[in-house]
Amino acid sequence: ASAYSSPIRALIIGSPGSGKGTLSKRLLKSIPSLQYLSAGDLLRHERQLGTELGRAAEEVMRKGTLMPDETMMKIVDARVSALPANSSWLLDGFPRTRNQAIMFDGALQRREHMLDVVLHLDVPNEVVLSRILERWIHEPSGRTYNLSFNPPKVPGKDDVTGEDLTKRIDDDAKTFEARLKSYEADTKPMVDYFSNAGGDSYVRLQGTSSDEIWPRMLAIVKQRF
């Protein structure tokens, strides 16, 4: 049984490389009843299955742009609506635009649910870019490594399987800068929406490292339960 009295429904938002994955993992360790839902993992699953959606996602990643709102909404909403009504969850990577935020909010309200907290990681672009250039992934599992602060035990190999690590197709400097521009253009209106509409559920967490952001983030989430 959960040690917490009520379910919590949380979003974590931030630019690519802002530490969403790292901080989400810490949160799940601290609050085991929390289910982690990653839009990236859902898309990766589609790509591995070779679906039409998966092929579209691959093309979008190459260009550094975003998936269409309706497509992402369909994928994420199917996953969220499959959870038991009293589940606690943390959603990472969706919504990414104001329109997605409005659609998702509406879908939750139709189920008489609401977002308890929106955690916005605000990390300087130069910090994010240096992290991205040092990032390596194990594509089948989604495990991520960083050469500076989370290196693999054996260089170039996944800790669990021993398989080769690769770069994400959108992790070179040029594509990444396009992703950041795209993220900022699409996401600022979404952040404005949450900060205006969300009342005290919207929380901006500024910092240059996950260690700096973590204590405040944990305290905020625990307050909401």
Image: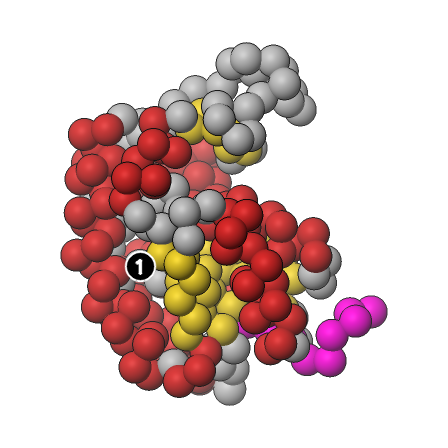
Coordinates of residue 132 in the picture (x, y in percent): 36, 33
Residue 192 x %, y %: 26, 73
Amino acid type, mark 1 = Arg
Which quadrant: the C terminus? bottom right
View extreme (right): residue: 1
Q: Nearer the viewer, residue 221 or 97?
A: 221
Q: Is residue 83 visible?
A: no
Q: Which of the pair 46/60 is nearer the observer?
A: 60
Residue at the image point whose x is 36% and y is 51% from the top: 123
* Number of marks in the rendered image: 1
Q: Main secondary structure of the magenta part?
A: loop
Range of magenta residues: 1-9
Q: Residue at x 19, y 49 (%)?
A: 182
**173 horizontally vs 13: left or right:** left
What's the image's color scheme? secondary structure
- Residue depicted at 25% across the width and 60% down the height: 187
Q: Quadrant of residue 96?
A: bottom left
- Tag 1 residue: 96
- Determine which quarter of the picture holds residue 62: top left
